[in-house]
Image: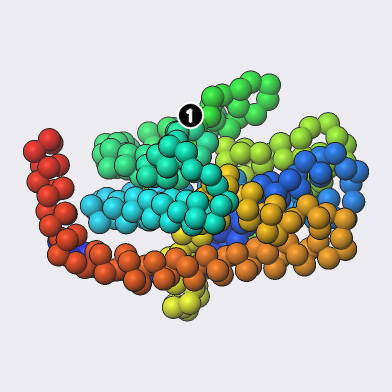
Amino acid sequence: MVEVKKERNSNLELYRVVVMLLIVAHHYVVNSGLFQLMESSLLSGNTLFLYLFGMWGKTGINCFVLITGYFMCKSDISISKFLKLLLEVFFYEVVIYSIFLSCGVVSFNWKSLFLALIPIGNVGRGFTTSFIFFYLSIPFLNILLRNMSKRQHKLLIIYCLFIYTIWAFYPFTVVFNYVTWFIILFFISSYIRLYPIKRDGDVKFWSLLTFCSVILSCLSVIILKVLDVWWPYKFMQDSNSIMALVTAVCSFMLFKNLKIKQSKVVNLMGASTFGVLLIHANSDAMRQWLWKDTLENVSWFGSPYLWVHATLSVLVIFILCVFIDQIRIRFIERPFFSSSIYVNLESYIQKFLWKIS
């Protein structure tokens, strides 16, 4: 079966690019040893910069899932879509592990080999595995959507957010995993798609709300750090945190309605944002090699040029990862999915699914 290739919307592809840059910035801070220094240090210009620079990672996760839910609530998961996702994860797991092994960055053991060959792992707080299982649940979620009224849909969202965002805030705790949270985000984005509100297309309105949510998020971090009463990221600490959710929804509504010209460059970068994540956040070995051994983020903590190092590091990593992923797409993904091997594989999978259904 040949899929009709749909043109990407540059407004949402630009959104993907911005969000991924924020996620890389988050990893610059939290995966490098800088965060431990920040927590044990007095508030300074560099400390404040790092808190604000690295605070958007969990918001970014929400943004990506909102985009997925918005499109997939009116679409079906094809074999090619799922295989592209799975094989992309598998490709980077195997290739990066092989490179690190050959260069002596990691030592061989059977467990690490097994983890490299199996592209999915523990379900919990890891993004990639949780996203794959969430993705597989979408056909069942769409059946639920088709059998719910608008009122039921709205009440379901309110109920889920009460448990995962309000009840989980303080002083109670809720056992959290990303698969469940991604499903809740799917309910939110599908509601946005299926039942547009009166001010759905008002760019000025959503620009104002996005600006206000960003300012409130920043102020919450600064105030909590100064007062030292709670963890500075209390309102942003995970994807279900109130400001991480509000900022994601408001910014999604803004970019969804943003009118910009179609851009091949933006669309190209947007298509590789998942690849950027899979490369730079591949494993503990990658985090050690990238942020600690190569970029040596901690050594810049007291430098007046920390902001330069942070900004350039994020931009260069993003550009290099996009370049690598575009090579993969052009020379591996496209040839494979247009080959007779894939056609036969797809036919076999379809027959198998037909038999078990």
Dot 1 amino acid type: Tyr
**In the shown orientation, is residue 226 left or right of residue 99?**
right
The residue lying at 79 percent from left, 63 percent from top is 307
Estimate the x, y position of residue 168 in percent, counting from the top left. Answer: 60, 27
Q: Is residue 326 above or below residue 254?
A: below
Total number of numbered discs in the rendering: 1
Nearest to the observer: residue 187 or residue 8? 8
Secondary structure of the residue carrying tag 1 is helix
The residue lying at 58 percent from left, 44 percent from top is 284
The residue lying at 32 percent from left, 56 percent from top is 84
Estimate the x, y position of residue 35 in percent, counting from the top left. Answer: 75, 44
The residue lying at 48 percent from left, 29 percent from top is 159
**In the shown orientation, is residue 23 left or right of residue 349?**
right
- Pointer 1: what residue? 159
Figure colour scheme: rainbow
The C terminus: image quadrant: top left
Estimate the x, y position of residue 206 in percent, counting from the top left. Answer: 59, 59
Q: Is residue 147 visible?
A: yes
- Mark 1 crowd level (few <14, some 14–19, many ≥20, 10 Å Cα): few
